[in-house]
Amino acid sequence: MPPFPSQAEVEETLKRIQSQNGVQGIIIVNTEGIPIKTTLDNASTVQYAGLIHQLVMKARSTVRDIDPQNDLTFLRVRSKKNEIMIAPDKDAFSNKTSFLLY
Amino acid sequence: MPVNFPDVQGKRDTVKEQVTEDMLKEVIDLYISETDSISLLDIPSTFVSVDADDAEPIMERNNQYAEACRSRMDNDKYVDQSVQTLNGATKNKQVQSDSIVMVDKVGSTDSTGNNASGWVLSPVMSLLACIILLCFSSASAASSLKEVEALGNSLNAESDLQLIMLSEKFQHCLLVMERSILGNIFQPQLAAYRQLPVIEDPESPVKPGMGEQREEDAESPRSPAVVRLWAFSCELSRGSSVSSMAWNKKNPDLLAVGYGEFGSSNQKPGLVCCWSLKNPTWPERVIRCDSAVTSLDFSSNNPSQLAVGMQDGSIAIYNVKSRDNKACFISSSGCPNRHLDPVWQLRWTQQELSLTGEEKVESLFSVAADGRISKWFVSNNGLDCIDLMKLKKSHNTKKKAGGTTTGKKTESVLSALTPGLCFDFHPTDASVYLVGTWEGLIHKCSCSNSQQFLETFKKHFCPVNHVTWSPLSPDVFLSCSADWTIQLWKQDHHKPVLGFTSTQRTVCDIKWSPKWATVFGAVNEGQLEIWDLNSSILDPVIVQPAAAGVKMNSLLFAPQTDCVLVGDSDGQVTVYQLRNLCVGDSSQVTLKGKPYIFVPEQHQKRHYRPTWTTVEEIQYTFHF
């Protein structure tokens, strides 16, 4: 079991990513789709978080429908002006619904 | 009455409406009741009197039916066939609800495998992160970044962030993200390294100057050259000098580089960085050592073990799999027999055990400045060694005029061993190896004989910096030394077959190309030289001068691709790609006439013995 990564290392990695040439911003989102850390302004963050949430769920369900053992690991959307890279976690955006019948 | 859950999706776009605590605590009543029975089909049986007219056919029919029912089991006339009702097109309706986590007691695990240690923490523990990154393509200008405080309105935002940041999966996401971005940035260089065709971005605006440049390239004659691809460097390594580099035996993308300053005045601590090709801006692992690192090697049997030799003579074996600096670290500092002088070279070699002949055991060998070549093995949580050879000083044949008694006294005080600087094991017979010494001699030794050298090759009169067997031609080896020359030897000849010199600088490192038998690379402090014996034995085919103020120290060929890595005194490891190096198919280089070492005229002003010796005419033919 590799040792627990320290907070400082994680912060450093985030800083390095941010300082790379061409990176516009980073948003970190939790499972419910609520952004918890961001380097962009509020409006853009909320817009991106909301739109990306649906896209990731759709992509994920597509991958899993084709092969239930498979799962989405990375998603890149390349457009004329920029590129969006999404690294979802395994349990992120999982759609758990349950019915209770009496 | 069907059960209906409220649809919460529509509330995402406006931030104003918040799900407050009261709304969540509100109790909603749902009533479920039983429906009335609905009959779908009801055909009651009819009665006919026995005396009626059509009683007989009815009775016959009844009997026939009873007969059929009885014989239905094994009769071929009756086949069981299922029929499927048609399913109409489904319409997916997405509903979201909070995940229901079962918690029985403290310390139990729930269905997702997370350790649920309390009902407050469990939903938080299953929260994991997703990172979204926005990037520009290379055509557009960079925009400014604003730092904004966390947006999360939920109560657990702070703790969410903490837990997410510390989770292993988040680190993995970050790693993948960083590599993807760097893959974007370095795509042309990495593609050139891996010899893939570079795909041009169809959308990127074509610069007006580029078109002309491309035409020029197509017209100019293709002469061999090196093209600089990228350089591995980071703030940690800047300023220290690169001392050694080694590729991982299992993962050809992993490179270990050792750094250290060798001035005797300052004993700065050394550094080992493990770089991955996928990230040229930051090393994957950083290991800080107590003293300057002089040599490195990866093991083949355990590919994650890296042996590091240092200037104070200690040898440590690190496991690069773990991120922890000091984990899995075995050192030779406890061994009483350890080297006390810089360990100039380390090598893991597989040797056959003499009895079986089939088994190969891998051991670590080292050569150090105290004149010993040792074989190391792990014992009692530390390293222990046995000496394979002691490099004795060769006795001077000239007799000193007078004062012989004083000469003898001084000899007994000084050590009788001469520092060993480099060694190399024969590629096919691992019990035979060559050692280069401070005196300029190269000894051929065997692992089974620890008293005598098998052969001695004398030519250099300055320390031999590097000696290396050719991987593709048997019995041919190269040596380079501080006397500015490179010598090519054949195993049975006591004199070198060819000598090369091109500048008045000490040659620091020399390596054979793993792909072409007649190509080797050499690095003296001022430039990188690539020699091709097939095209010229007087001049290098490619010369790449070092950047101003920087000295090139070490050289490494990249396997399976035509790139070389050069380490310099500024802590940078630059990757160059060899282009247009046409190595002919012919594998023979024929030399007629007197073998001699050619030294250009301007060097002849210096004081040393004649540069060429005449021997009878011999025709040398090399088969590579």
Image (tube, helix red, strand yellow):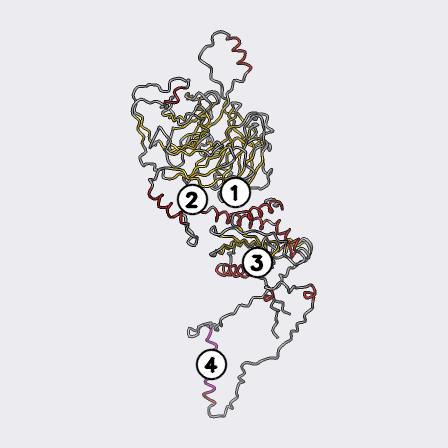
- Chain letter for mark 1: B
Residue B33 percent across, percent down from the top left: 64, 75
- Chain letter for mark 3: A
Residue assigned mark 2:
B194
Task: Give the spatial CA distance, label 2 vs label 1.
Answer: 18 Å
Please state which amino acid type lies under the numbered disc 2: Arg
- Give the answer, above or below, for where B343 lies relative to B104: above
Task: Give the spatial CA distance, label 4 vs label 1.
Answer: 88 Å
Q: How many other residues sit within 10 Å of disc 2, few (<14), some (14-19) or many (≥20)? A: few
Q: Earlier in the sequence, mark 4 or mark 1?
A: 4
Marks 1/3 in contact by CB < 8 Å: the verdict is no
On whether disc 3 and disc 2 are found on a single subunit, the reply is: no
Q: How many other residues sit within 10 Å of disc 1, few (<14), some (14-19) or many (≥20)? A: some
Task: Give the spatial CA distance, label 3 vs label 2.
Answer: 38 Å
Residue B396 percent across, percent down from the top left: 46, 14
On whether disc 2 and disc 1 are found on a single subunit, the reply is: yes
- Closer to us: mark 2 or mark 1? 1
Residue assigned mark 3:
A44
Q: How many other residues sit within 10 Å of disc 3, few (<14), some (14-19) or many (≥20)? A: few
Residue assigned mark 1:
B281
The region drawn magenta spans B58-74
Is residue B222 visible in the rendered structure shown here?
A: yes
Marks 3/4 in contact by CB < 8 Å: the verdict is no
Q: Quadrant of the N terminus of chain B?
A: bottom right
The foreground one among B232 and A82 is A82
Task: Give the spatial CA distance, label 3 vs label 4.
Answer: 77 Å
Please state which amino acid type lies under the numbered disc 4: Tyr
Q: Secondary structure at mark 2?
A: loop
Please state which amino acid type lies under the numbered disc 1: Thr
Residue assigned mark 4:
B65
